[in-house]
């Protein structure tokens, strides 16, 4: 793991095979964030009115306020190269990242995404195992923490959804540290 991680999220034209990214956002562990609406390339024509109802971004808004793909790809490469990148759904977000990178004339794997849940489990494991907590199902522990954050529906906008992943990381860290602290107290009492 590098010193700096970032969580990415996309909104897209649809969930079809021909979908393309219309919004990207990322947030670093230090909470620095960035977000762009993306002006579609001329050959990006897929559009779902149902998706528009969910994210609330219109094609007209993208045409007038979206940044050109080349500009967005240049910005993401400058900001994100060399960092560990995570997404809640790397299969979908990775698809749209690849479309964006190719649209900007870059190799589709110039940046790669990992699954946020894998990071959460690794962080919890490190904290708990270093404190001597061995008899715990880390995946279940993390899943329970994440489930508590699902009471609020996702915003279906890239930046709030990326920030939710950062908040989940912080919740996992705090819960792991609290459990580790309890385990250390209990071991010193015996």
Image (tube, helix red, strand yellow):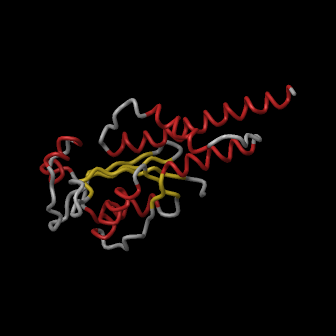
Along the line of sight, the residue nearer the viewer: 143 or 165:
143
Residue at 27% x, 68% y: name it: 103
Residue 186 coordinates in the image, percent (x, y): 79, 28
Residue 91 coordinates in the image, percent (x, y): 38, 58
179 on left or right of 28: right
Residue 77 coordinates in the image, percent (x, y): 42, 64
Residue at 31% x, 60% y: name it: 96
Along the line of sight, the residue nearer the viewer: 88 or 56:
88
Residue at 18% x, 51% y: name it: 62
Task: Indicate whether 17 appears above or below 165.
Answer: below
Along the line of sight, the residue nearer the viewer: 18 or 6:
18
Residue 12 coordinates in the image, percent (x, y): 25, 53
Quadrant location of the N terminus in the rendered image = bottom right
Quadrant location of the C terminus in the rendered image = top right
Task: Indicate whether 81 appears above or below 142.
Answer: below
Number of marks in picture = 0
Residue 177 quadrant: top right
87 on left or right of 72: right
Residue 55 quadrant: top left
Task: Indicate whether 152 appears above or below 37.
Answer: above
């Amino acid at each position: 793991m590098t010193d700096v991680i970032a969580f990415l999220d996309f909104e897209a034209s649809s969930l079809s095979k021909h979908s393309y990214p219309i919004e990207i956002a990322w947030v670093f562990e230090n909470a620095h964030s960035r977000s762009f609406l993306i002006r579609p390339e001329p050959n990006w024509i897929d559009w779902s009115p149902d998706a528009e109802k969910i994210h609330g971004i219109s094609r007209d808004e993208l045409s007038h306020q979206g940044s050109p793909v080349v500009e967005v790809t240049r910005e993401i490469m400058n900001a994100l190269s060399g960092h560990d990148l995570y997404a809640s759904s790397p299969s979908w977000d990775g698809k749209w990242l690849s479309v964006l990178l190719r649209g900007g004339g870059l190799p589709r794997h110039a940046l790669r995404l990992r699954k946020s849940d894998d990071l959460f489990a690794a962080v919890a494991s490190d904290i708990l195992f270093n404190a001597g907590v061995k008899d715990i199902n880390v995946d279940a522990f993390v899943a329970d923490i994440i489930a508590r954050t699902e009471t609020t529906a996702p915003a279906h906008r890239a930046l709030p959804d990326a920030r939710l992943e950062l908040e989940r990381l912080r919740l996992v860290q705090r819960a792991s540290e609290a459990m580790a602290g309890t385990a250390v107290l209990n071991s010193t009492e015996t």
